[in-house]
Each structure stands twice: as C-alpha cells, then as structure tokens.
Image (cartoon, grey):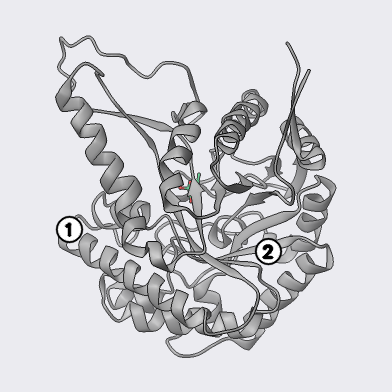
Amino acid sequence: MKKLKFPKDFLWGTATSAYQVEGGIGNSDWSKVYPAGLACNHYNLYEKDFDLIKKLNQNAYRFSIEWSRIEPEEGKFDKREIEHYRRYLQSLKARKITTIVTLHHFTNPLWLAKIGGWANKKVVFYFSRFANRVFDEYKDLVDFWITINEPLIYGSISYLERRWPPKKRNPILFLKTLRNQITCHKKIYEIFHKSKNNFQIGIVKHNSYFEPFNSKSPLDRFNAKVYRYFWNEYFLNRIKNHLDFVGLNYYSRDKVGIKFPFQKGSENEGKWSDIGWEIYPEGIYHVLKGLKKYNLPIYITENGLADAKDKLRKDFIKNHLYWVHKAIEEGVDVKGYFHWSLMDNFEWEKGFDPRFGLIEIDYKTLERKIRPSALFYAKICKENALILCRD
Ligand code: FCB
C-alpha cells in the first residue's frame, strides 16, 4: 500500500454550471435553441445538494452565476435573483465550503445575443458592469472568481463550428470574440483588485495534451507544437499579468498531424468514455508541466468523464490523481482538484444522455443517488491522499 499525500489545505471539490444544473432558465441564448427544462432543479434543491457535497467530504464547490437571471433586460438587475444567489452562497459558507464562482460559463442573456453577443465590442462594457455588480453584492462570500470558462472552446464552437449559439462559421467573429474576452478579463481583474477584499481571480482554460499523430514525422511534430501554442498558451500569454491563478480543465489527449490512408501511425489506444473521449491520465501531467512556466498556483477546475454505468470513473479519478501528484512532486504548484461533475447534468448540445455525475440524477423524479465512485472520491477528499493498493 502506498499513500500519496496532497499538499496542506488542498481544495477537493466538484464543479457545475448554472445552465447545466439549475433548471428554469428561460431567458438565455440557449433557452430556445437547446432547452434544458428543469435540468436537475438545483435552483430549488441546492440545500440538499450542498448537504451531499458535505457528506462526500468535499471542501470546495465551483459553480456559475447565470447572467440572464441577474440581468434579464439590459441594465435591469433582478433583486429577487440577486437575493437567491446570496442565499445560495450563504448556504455554502454556512457549511464551510470554499466558493469558486464562474461569471461566464457559455450562456448569455438573450438581449446580449440579439446585439451580436461576444463578437460585439459592447460586451466589454456589459460584461464588466455585470461582473462589477455581482462582485459588489457577493464579495464577502466568494473566495475565488473565474471570469470566463474555456474562452477558446466557447469561441470556436459558437463562431467556427456552428454547434452552439449563435451557430456561426465566421473567423472574423471568432477573432473579435477572442479579443473581447481578453479585454474583458483584464478589465475585470483590474476592477476587482481595487477592492481590499481577500479573494483571488483567474481564468479557466481548457488545455489538451497534443501529441503528433506520427512521432517520426517532423510535420506532425510541428503540428503538435502549433496546437500547443495556439490552443494551450496563446490566451494565457495575453493575460498572464492579470491572473492570480490558472484554472485548468483537462479531459483528454489529441493526436494531430497528417493522416494518410496508408500511413502506419499510432492511433489513440486505451479506454474511451461513453461519448468517445479518450481516457488518457498521463496527459494531465504533461499539461500541468506545460503550465509551470506561468509561475502561478494551478487549480484543476474540471476533470471527469461520461460513464453512465460508473465502471470507469473510479480508475479515472485514481489514475488522473496519480499523475497530478507526480506533477506536484516535481514542483508544479497544484492547489486543488474539482471533479466534473457533482451530478449528472445537461451536457450542452448532447443533452441529458451523457452522465458525468458522481451523483446520479433520475430525471423523472429528480432523485439523487450517490454512485460508488463518489464514495471512492470522498475517501480521497477526507484523507487528503490517494491510497494505492496493489491490485
Ligand atoms: C467542459 C465544460 C463543462 C462540461 C464539460 C464536460 O468543456 O466546461 O461545462 O460540459 O466540458
């Protein structure tokens, strides 16, 4: 038996986002295109869910505040919703759970979408006004702020791949979105830091482990380098002086390069999640090592898999944490791990089929059922250590 200890005060938690779990969001750009209905009804059942977080020994929770609830019409802030999130935060604090709030997790108020969303320069004014208001309301209740979740995923899927609202394929709009995200992030960082409150503010980046499809091909190796630079580093390089920490979402590895029909390259081997994402735990180690140069604390803000039968989740957690621990031993300053997700939820355009939860949701009764892997994770959270048995 081997015990891999994690650093003192390590944050152990789970992550969700408002649109995916709350239910009843009718005023966002997703509401008509991909309605999430009642989702998990977390909006009303949050106390119950926070009890489960506590029961499962997690000491931190990452979630998002839905902009379309707080500001349903441009410039009009909804007092009832502001009070709702205050109670929500107070109820986490009452349980001594560290709070990590994401300000933008993919969804937008309809009014913003109607004037061009993130591609419109005005978003800088609107989003920072929203952020500022939220900060003023909740600054005593929030430990960590995240401005934007996965800026490049959001920009590319919405403005290049046409899969998410506004379903465009327009590189110019993509680049404008990128520029506005960078400006927004920096501006909000500066506004927040005018306050003396004790908090940290950062970004959440989706970084992948890019490998050349054929490691012998210089072209493929070059390709992997280009991806690493543009996908993993470019955004961070632009905002690196405006970050207290980096949030890392790691899910999988990507093999890149030119694949001829006759070429014998190494295909992705190993296991796959229910939605076909390769499970590659070692990748998290390489991605973490890649982030070391920023010299900032790192929180793993998402890592998880769709696994309805809960057959792979336990090993998934164990193996990823093994590699996280190795990175820590080699000097990478990882300070927390958030599993995606606390419970099954609405997986964007894929709907409710993918099951990412440590807790299973019965969408008919909204009953919560703790999966065996959740108990396994709870033990790690409690011990602040990963215990490896020889089996
Ligand atoms: C991430 C998203 C999160 C969830 C997971 C599976 O890209 O941030 O909302 O959908 O993927």
Image quadrant where one finds the N terminus: top right
Position of residue 29 in the picture relative to residue 347 (left or right) = left
User: Vertically, is 261 above or below 48?
Assistant: above
Q: Which residue is mark 2?
A: 99
284 to 201, vertically: above or below: above
Residue 244 to residue 7: above or below: below
Q: Is residue 335 visible?
A: yes
According to the picture, the residue beneath numbered tag 1 turns out to be 170
Residue drawn at x 72%, y 71% is: 89
Q: Which mark is residue 128?
A: none
**How far apart are the two marked residues, 1 and 2, measured between alpha carbons?**
36 Å
Q: Residues within 10 Å of mark 2 (few under 14, many from 20)?
A: many
Judged by depth in the image, the label closer to the viewer, 1 or 2, is 2
Instruction: Tell which residue pokes out farthest to the bottom in this image.
Output: 76
Image check: 282 left or right of 267?
Answer: right
Labels 1 & 2 near each other (Cβ < 8 A) = no
In the rendered image, which quarter is residue 314 located in?
A: top right
Residue 349 visible somewhere in the drawing:
no
Earlier in the chain: of badge 1 and badge 2, it is 2
Q: Is ligand 1 less than 8 Å from the beta carbon at label 2?
A: no
> Three-letter amino acid code at disc 2?
Thr
